Amino acid sequence: MGRYQKPGFWRSLNQAWRGLLYTLKTQGHMQFHVFAGTLVLGFAWWSKVSRFEWLILILAIGCVLGAEVMNSAVEIVVDMVQPNFHPLAGMAKDVASGAVLVTSIQAVIIGITIFAPLLYRFVGKAF
């Protein structure tokens, strides 16, 4: 067998966790998204959303976190390949950041759609 051996499942899983933890430790935006997602899930629990709404919220949060991880990967590779400023390198980073923006906007719209009626009822009862 050659020098390269296909990693086993547990090794691949360990490497994936290592990458995820690296992103969480080093990327402020990832930390913000995890914090915001945790708040949203806490609010969902408090407001007793339906099972379907739970699934949609989890999917939206997962999309944002996944996009942020991929954005970090793109930035690392671009910095490795092109350590000096280059317009295309900057555009690659901007496009990857745009993917995070798209998923974040989607998540906000989902959150508003799910929570606005609940907040409206809550505020209506308070006054």
Image: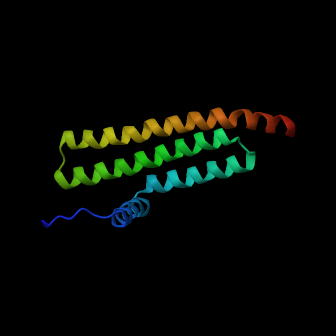
The relative height of residue 67 versus residue 121 in the rendered view (above or below) is below
Tell me where residue 112 sits by quadrant: top right
Way the structure is coloured: rainbow
Residue 105, given in percent of the width and then of the height, sits at 50, 35
Residue 82 lies, in percent from the top left, at 17, 50
Who's the residue at 21% across and 43% down the image? 89
Indicate the quadrant where residue 47 lies: top right
Q: Is residue 62 left or right of residue 11?
A: right
- From what the image shows, is residue 32 above or below residue 99? below
Give the image location of residue 1, x and y in percent.
14, 66
Residue 15, image x, y percentages: 34, 64
Q: Is residue 26 visible?
A: yes
In the image, taking residue 49 as reference, residue 94 lies left or right, namely: left
> Which residue: 37% across, 60% down?
16
Residue 83 visible from this viewpoint: no
**Residue at the image position 70 percent from the left and 40 percent from the top:** 50
- The image shows residue 62, relative to residue 115, as above or below, that is below
Q: Quadrant of the C terminus?
A: top right
Of residues 81 and 114, the one nearer the viewer is: 114
Name the side, left or right, on which 32 lies relative to 51.
Answer: left
In the image shown, does 9 or 43 lie closer to the viewer?
9
Q: Residue placed farthest to the left in the image?
A: 2
Q: Residue 111 occupies which quadrant of the picture?
A: top right
In the rendered image, the residue lying farthest to the front is: 1
Picture mark count: 0
